[in-house]
Amino acid sequence: MFEVGVIEEPGAAEVALDPIRARLLALLVEPHSATSLAAIVGLPRQKVNYHLKTLEAHGLVELVEERRKGNVTERLLRAAAASFVISPTALAAVAPDPERSPDKLSARWLLAVAARLVKEVGTLITGAARAGKPVATFALDGTVRFASAADRAAFAQELTAAIAGLVSRYHDERAEGGRDHRVIVAIHPSLRPEATRPMDAAAVDADIDVQIESQHRPETKES
C-alpha cells in the first residue's frame, strides 16, 4: 500500500468523491470484506459489495486475500493507498495553468502553481511505479512567525536572492544528459489552530490584506 495515491482518471475521481465510497476507502486502510464493512457502515452487504466492485474496477482498492467459508468465497480488500489526492489531470479541460495567470503576486497564481505541482509529481509517481523506480524529489516544510509585514517582505526578498544565487551556481545549460528540475518556493499565512472549521470572512480578508500589502510594498532606502 502506498502512503499517497494519485487519482488521474476522471472516472476514478468521480467514484472516489462519492461519500459512501470515500468512507469505504478510509476504512480500507485495513483489509476488510464486504460483510465486515457492511456491519461497520450499516448498509446491506450487497450494496457494499457493489461499491467495492466499482472501487476495484478503477484501481482504488485491491484484493489481498480470498477465504473459503463453506460454499462462499470471502474476498478481503484493501485500499490501494492510505490516502488519495486528485490530480488536475482528472479535470484537464479546466485545470489551472500558471501561464494563464498574469498576476504572479496573487494567491490564485500560487494555487495554480500548486496544482501544477500535484499534476507533474503525480505523473512522475505513476510512471515510476510502473517502472519500479523511485522519484528523486526534495521538499521543505516549515513555519516562521514574522513580527511585521515589513519583516515578511524582507524575508521574501532575502529568500529570493538566496534561491537565485543557488540556481545561478548549479544551473548548467550546456550539461549533456542533464535534466531540468522545477524549483518552487511558496510563502502563505498559516491557518489558525481553530481553522478546523471554515474561517470567518473577516479573518480571511484580514490575512489576505496583509499578504497583498507585503507583496506590493515598495522598496525603501535609508538615507
Image (spheres, grey):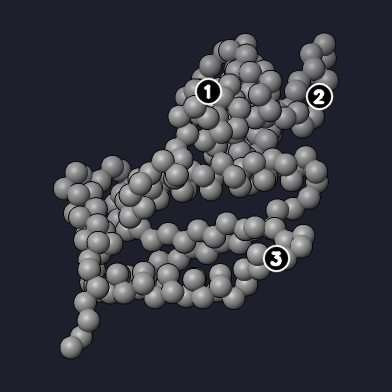
Q: Which mark is residue 67?
A: 2
Q: Give the quarter of the figure containing the N terminus.
A: top right
Which sits in the foreground, 117 or 57?
A: 117
Q: Nearer the viewer, mark 3 or mark 2?
A: 3
Say which quarter of the image contains residue 217.
Answer: bottom left
Task: Please tell me which residue is depicted at 30% across the width and 43% down the height of the picture.
Answer: 197
Question: Image height check: is 29 above or below 187?
Answer: above
- Is label 2 in a helix, a strand or a loop? strand
Which sits in the foreground, 32 or 122?
A: 122
Identified by mark 3, the residue type is Arg
Residue 4: % across, % down: 61, 44
Say which quarter of the image contains residue 12.
Answer: top right
Q: Which residue is mark 1?
A: 14
Q: Give the quarter of the figure containing the C terminus.
A: bottom left
Say which quarter of the image contains residue 143.
Answer: bottom left
Question: Image height check: is 40 above or below 175?
Answer: above
